[in-house]
Image (cartoon, rainbow, N blue to C red):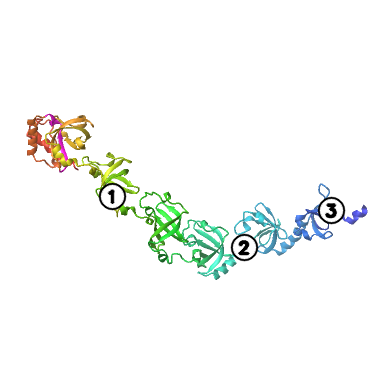
Amino acid sequence: MEQLLKESDFSTLKPGTVINGTIIEVRQNEVVVDIRGKSEGIIPLNEFPDPGELQVGAEIEVFLEKLEDRNGNPVVSFDKAQQKKNWETIATTAVEGSIVQGRVKAKIKGGLIVSVGVDAFMPASQIDVTPPKNLEQYVGQTYDFKILKINPERKNIVVSRRELIEEQRHEKRQTLLDEVKPGTKRKGIVKNITDYGAFVDLDGLDGLLHITDMTWGRVSHPGELLKVGEEIEVMIIEVDRDRERVSLGLKQCTSNPWENIERKYPVGARVRGKVVNLVAYGAFIEIEQGVEGLVHISELSWTKRISKPGEVLKIGQEIDAVILGVNKEEQKISLGVRQLEANPWDMVRHNYPVGARVRGKVRNLTNFGAFVELEEGIDGMVHVSDMSWTRRITHPGEMLKKGDDVEAIVLDVDADQQRISLGIKQTQDDPWAEIDRKYHIGDIVEGKVTKITNFGAFIELENEIDGLVHISQIGEEHVENIKNVLKLSQQVSARVIKIDKEERRIGLSIKAANYNPEQLQAEINAFDRIKPAPAQNAAPAPEGGNNNPASSENSGGELNNLGALLDKMGD
């Protein structure tokens, strides 16, 4: 035992020193080393850069951390021995800013551990130009690094791979800026995509490919044509060496399809294309790569009422169309779909001649009339003035409602403007044509109150003819408010005191309904003798005046007012 202890030189082993050892066994995950102590040291296999070179019997230097652990075995490290030995060399030879080669050993929080003879730290931000998401991919790889900082006291070294890459890229960029010329083509890798374009890496020099230079056709976002990492061929459009900027073009690598567009697509030609976009006012049709035409919503159908193109078309659908117009300068083509079929309005004059009696359904009401659908897409319009011979219609809703079936007469046809004028009243005889045979001055008539105004009441007679009872002709007593005397739909008796066939006016008098012939004749004579005053000069009968119907003064004043009001009935 004494001899063995003497041979082991155990007393010379001191923790914290580098000593020699002999490899006595190489296991699957560890190496057994004889350091001439009480027992062998165990070193993890991953501490050796190339485990395949290890041989039993070979001598290596190891760092003795402890003489014994809890199991009585010495704690040794090959890696720490190398670092301790190399640190002295690096501390004397390496300076901040110098380049060293190293191997990435492990990933830790915030970056990587790099072996450059000693362990150095590389922050994640210094790994590459763009910080990588996966740091594991670098473990085990060998690269050149730039020393950023050395701390001899703490024995820390910080290195960077990014700065070397940026310096190399800068050199490449300067070389490329001197080489590239507008009009030449180069290959590059799509580096980044934005809303307005894409940045392409030309092997060290980034160029901007604007969205307007990507295609001769339509593109709403660069991502529709390109993807990051894709290799493409582009043309150099412009080089700004002072600002180190390069403008690129993708569409310029192909011929401009609009160059001979007018010859390729003459007006009237029939083409086939694919719907690529739908907007409120129409549809864009791609008729070849980079060439689109617009079908305006009004050019989709002769007769169908289309509120939005999506009702008849969908994106990706292939359709036929007719060239309506070509504008090379603005790169616009107008297309039409309805021109593929005959225009039904060309047959309107034949199908709906003036004077023809037609039937249709009320499709829509406006302030000035009603639209009647005669067939799909063919409407006729009935103006309010052509709805009734006798009633004064101010809105079509007074006579019609949407969906009503009506009969009408064709009054006029304008195929060019796609208009048909219809009349409902023309389906019946004009009752005013024989008004003088139906009504005479002095006739007693029965009717219903249909409208009350501040100046009188309208009475509906036979054949829907209206007569006006002026406020002065309602009663013998002065009437302040007509609604206190008459009610809507009330049946009344009155005498006819005026008939104006040309102006379509009938004047009535309720108070004269009970006059005897002499009184009525006196009223009529008084009216005949007095020339009606203009409407603006008419004055109401004085309150408390003579109520004697035979009085020419009273009769003249009232009839004078009535004449003025009857003049207003046509307004």
**Of pointers 1 and 2, the one earlier in the residue sequence:** 2
Q: Position of residue 403 (x, y in %)?
A: 33, 41
For badge 1, the amino acid type reads Tyr
Is residue 405 toward the left or the right of residue 26 in the image? left
For badge 2, the amino acid type reads Ile
Q: Point out the frontmost of discs 1 and 2.
A: 1
Q: Secondary structure at mark 3?
A: loop
What's drawn in magenta, residue-wise? 502-514
Residue 286 figure quarter: bottom left
Q: CA distance from mark 1 to mark 3?
A: 116 Å
Asked if residue 246 lies in the magenta stretch, the reply is: no
Q: Position of residue 502 (x, y in %)?
A: 15, 43
Residue 210, which numbered label? Answer: none
Residue 352, which numbered label? Answer: 1
Is residue 58 toward the left or the right of residue 479 in the image? right
When the figure is inspected, residue 243 is found, relative to residue 302, above or below; the finding is: below
**Of pointers 2 and 3, the one earlier in the residue sequence:** 3
Q: Residue sitting at 62 percent across and 59 percent down?
A: 128
Residue 564 figure quarter: top left
Asked if residue 511 lies in the magenta stretch, the reply is: yes
**Of pointers 1 and 3, the one earlier in the residue sequence:** 3
For badge 3, the amino acid type reads Glu
Q: Position of residue 545 (x, y in %)?
A: 11, 31
Residue 40, which numbered label? Answer: 3
* Residue 496 showing in the rendered view: yes
Q: Position of residue 408 (x, y in %)?
A: 26, 44
Q: Which residue is mark 2?
A: 165
Q: Point out the frontmost of discs 1 and 3.
A: 1
Q: Quadrant of the C terminus?
A: top left
Instruction: Check whether the beta carbons of the residues at disc 1 and disc 3 lie within 8 A of each other.
Output: no
In the depicted view, which residue is nearer to us: 80 or 292?
A: 292
Q: Secondary structure at mark 2?
A: helix
